[in-house]
Image: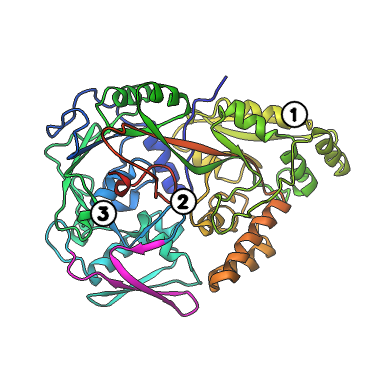
Amino acid sequence: MSPRRRRGLPYVTGSALLLTALVVSGCTSAGTDGDGAGGATGAGGKDNLVLGLETDIPGWDPSKLLPGSVQWASDAVYDTIFNCDEVGNISPNIAKSYEFTDNNTKLTLHLRAGMKFSDGTKLDGPAVRTALEYQVNSPGGRSYLPGVKVSSPDAETVVLTTPTPKSYLTTIMCMSSGAIASPAYLKSEKRDVAPVGSGPYLYDAAASKPGSVYVLTKNPDNWNADHYPYKKITLKVLSDRTARINALKTGQISGAITDASALSQLKSSGLKSLTQHGQWAGLLITDRKGKTVPALGDVRVRRAINMVFDKAAIAQKLYQGQAQPTPQIFRKNSTAWIDGLKDPYPYDLKAAKKLMADAGYADGFSLEIPFIAGTGYDAAMPVVIQGLKELNINAKQVTLSGSNALLDVLSGKYPIIFWPLGNNGDSRLTIDGAMLPTSVWNTHKVADPTIEQLWQTILTSKGEKADTAQQQINQHVIDEAWFAPWVYMDSFFGYDPKAIEVNKSSDPNQLAPKLSDFR
C-alpha cells in the first residue's frame, strides 16, 4: 500500500514553532469551490494569480510565519532583509549591502533608502531595529537569534551583534526571522487582522474571507514591484487534497502543492508539475551515547541499522519511485554535500547481523519509536519496525496525538525517531538544526568534540576552509552513523501551463515556489 504523501516539517525555528506548525496543519478550514472573493473569475487570467493553499495561514504576525505554500501570503506583504535562492545564496532586499566584522560577530546592514511601509511610515534604521528586536524576542528568535543585539546608529544602518560567531546570520535574514513589519503594527493588539509591511502586495481585508480566501493587490511603491507581474493574487485555502486537485483540474486555481499520487491526473488533464527536493526521510538515531538504550552507543549497532534498510526498494515501493536513495542527509549540491560519495552502508542483512553480533547484541533489544497520528506516515512506520525486527530489535510504536505530540517527540524520551526533515539550501542550517548540543533535532543533546571543532571553523572562517569543514562534518556523521537516511523525497507543485509559467523554485526550503518565480 502506498503512503499518503504528506510533506514532513522542514527545519523550523524551535519547539514553539514546531508546535504551531502541527496545530495549524490539523485545524484548517476546508476551501470553497467558488471563484473566491474580490471578483476573481476562474484562475484569474494574466492579471490575477490564483493559488491553492494546503493549509490556512497561521496569521499575519511575522514571528509566526511558516515555510511552504502558506509563505506566499507572508512573501506578498513583507520584505525580508535579504533574498535567498534555492541553495542559500543571498541577494539584496531591504538591505542593499552588508559587512561582517569582529570575527563574524558583527553584521552591519546598509538599508535601501526611501522605502516605506504600507501605512506610509518610513522603513528606516530605527524601524528595522524595532522589527528585528521583536523577532529576536519571539519563540523562533530565541532559537535562531539567541543573544542577538540590534542597534541603529543612523537612518540607513542597522547593526546586529551575536555573542558567538554566526556566519550564516545573513541566511537567517532571508527567512521569517528577517521579515520586517511596521513598529506601530507590532505594538497593536490586532496583528492578525491586517498586516503592515513593505512587500510587493497589499492585503485586501474587505475582499478576503479569513480561513477561506485571501486577496492581495499590487503595491506600486514596493522597490522591486516590476519583478512581480500580477496585479492581484488570490490564495484559496483548500486543505482537502481531492478538492485541491479538482480545483486545479477545473481551472479554479492555477497552481497548488500536490503529491505523487496526483501526477497521472495532472498529466491527463494537460497540467504540469514542478519537482522539488527539499527533504530526506529516514531515522534519526538520537541516543548516540546510549543513555536510554545502551546498544545505540555502539557505532556498530548504528551502522547495522543503516544496512538493514533497502533504500532502492523503499524509494520505488514506499515512495512510488518519487524519491532517490541517499546515504547523506544534506541536499545535493549544497556546500556540505559530498559529490560522488559511495554508500558506505548498502543493504546487506548478513553484514548487519554480523555487526550486531560483534557488538554483543545478536539477540537484539527493545526500544520505543514515536508516531504522531494524522501526519501521513502510516505506511512508513511498518517499514521501520520490520527492518529493525530483522536485527532482533523489538521496536514498539508509541502513537501520540494532541497539541503536545511534537513536543513529546522532541523531549529526549525516544532513542530513535522517524521524521522527514528539511535539507536546507544553506547546509549550515541543517547542521544547526540537527547536530549541535543546542539543536532542536539533537533531542538527547549529544555533544561531539569533532563537530564542535569543525563548527567553530565554519563560524569563524570563509571560503574553502569553511566549506571543507562542512563536508568534514557530513563525513563524520556518516562514519558515526548518527542517522539512517533512506531517500531524498520529491515534492510537487502542480500548475496550469496555460495560466502561469514557473520554471524553477528558488525557495531555500524547496517546499513551494516563491511568488517571484511565477510568470
Q: Main secondary structure of the magenta part?
A: strand
Q: Is residue 183 left or right of residue 507?
A: left
The colour scheme is rainbow
Q: Is residue 418 above or below residue 60?
A: above
Can residue 197 be spotted in the picture? no
Label 2 amino acid? Gly
Q: Which mark is residue 389?
A: 1
User: Spatial distance from mark 2 to mark 3, Cα to Cα?
Assistant: 22 Å
| Residue 117 locus on image (x, y percent) | 17, 59
Q: Which mark is residue 14?
A: 2
Q: Earlier in the sequence, mark 1 or mark 3?
A: 3
| Residue 379 locus on image (x, y percent) | 57, 25
To which quarter of the image does residue 153 belong?
bottom left
Q: Which mark is residue 493?
A: none
Label 1 amino acid? Lys
| Residue 173 locus on image (x, y percent) | 38, 61
To which quarter of the image does residue 198 belong?
bottom left
Q: Is residue 462 left or right of residue 192?
A: right
Q: Is residue 508 left or right of residue 62?
A: right
Mark 3, residue position: 78
Label 3 amino acid? Tyr
User: Spatial distance from mark 2 to mark 1, Cα to Cα?
Assistant: 33 Å
- Toward the viewer: 517 or 5? 517
Residue 215 counted in the magenta span: no
Q: Is residue 19 above or below residue 245?
A: below
Q: Which residues are magenta?
A: 90-115
Dot 1: within a 10 Å radius of its alpha carbon, few (fewer than 14), some, or many (20 or more) residues? some
User: Which residue is depicted at the point 48% across and 48% down?
Assistant: 11
Q: What secondary structure is found at the residue carrying circle 3?
A: loop
User: Which residue is depicted at the point 24% across and 69% down?
Assistant: 112
